[in-house]
Amino acid sequence: MIIKNDSRYGVADYSYKMAGELPGITKLVKDFYHTMNSLSEANIIRNMHPNDLSESEKKLTYFLSGWLGGPKLYAKHYGSINIPLSHKHLKVGIEETKAWLLCMKKSVDNQPYESDFKIYLMEQLSVPAERIRVVSSNQ
Ligand code: HEM
């Protein structure tokens, strides 16, 4: 059976609402960095981050808020951002991309989201993750 995604995902702030707005996204990102801290497969990307993850956590939360159609908090607090270029100083290959998406999948699975929204979200996140990898490999 083919499950068709809710076609409202990606329209206006619908995805932001489905993700639980700012409290839901904050929880997702907290779980994401907690997973990155505890999963041995994620050591490779944990080591790229600063020891104190609080700023990384805040930046990703703010970015996802706007990216999901909610308030553009990253732009408001830090200015504009181009995701692939903001990772250009890092070496992001297949292993690093897989590790990032694995941490995100585990965290998304932890959230009380509808199951087709979980699938949609992971599909959408894999697009910038792949762009980061391509930009990194072209250096
Ligand atoms: C493909 C695998 C990825 C890896 C290995 C990775 C790794 C990192 C690292 C190490 C940092 C901290 C950089 C620093 O402090 O110098 C960072 C920052 C950040 N990442 Fe990623 N990331 C990945 C994918 C993504 C994706 C897909 C998104 C968005 C959906 C994202 C959004 C961000 C944001 C918003 C920041 C803060 C950037 C800034 O303000 O400079 N990352 N990432």
Image (cartoon, rainbow, N blue to C red):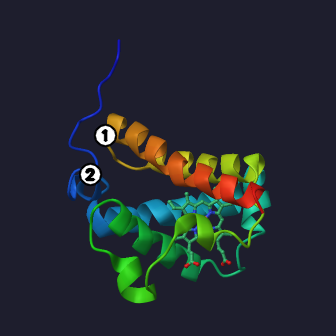
Q: CA distance from mark 2 to mark 1?
A: 8 Å
Occupied quadrant, residue 3 = top left
Q: Which residue is mark 1?
A: 114
Q: Position of residue 12 (x, y in %)?
A: 20, 57
Q: Position of residue 136 (x, y in %)?
A: 72, 60
Q: Earlier along the polypeptide chain: callout 2 or callout 1? A: 2
Instruction: Return the residue nearer the eye: 31 or 131.
Output: 131
Instruction: Return the residue nearer the eye: 55 or 89.
Output: 89
What label does residue 31 carry, if any? none
Kindly identify the amino acid type of the residue bearing the numbered disc 1.
Glu
Horizontal placement of 111 versus 32: left or right? left
* Residue located at (49% from left, 77% from top): 59
Q: Residue furthest front?
A: 138
Instruction: Return the residue nearer the eye: 79 or 118.
Output: 79
3 is higher (above) or lower (below) than 11: above
Horizontal placement of 60 versus 111: left or right? right
Pointer 2 local density, CA inside 10 Å: few below 14, some 14–19, many at least 20: some
Is the distance from the Cβ of mark 2 to the nearest ligand 1 atom less than 8 Å? no
81 is higher (above) or lower (below) than 126: below
Ligand 1: give its quadrant. bottom right
Is the distance from the Cβ of mark 1 to the nearest ligand 1 atom less than 8 Å? no
Q: Position of residue 31 (x, y in %)?
A: 52, 60
Q: Which residue is mark 2?
A: 18
Element under label 1?
Answer: loop
Horizontal placement of 82 versus 117: left or right? right
Pointer 1 local density, CA inside 10 Å: few below 14, some 14–19, many at least 20: few
* Residue located at (49% from left, 64% from top): 29
Kindly identify the amino acid type of the residue bearing the numbered disc 2.
Met
* Residue located at (34% from left, 68% from top): 66
* Residue located at (73% from left, 55% from top): 42
Q: Quadrant of the N terminus?
A: top left
Task: For the residues labelled 2 and 1, say whether their Cβ atoms are less than 8 Å apart.
Answer: yes
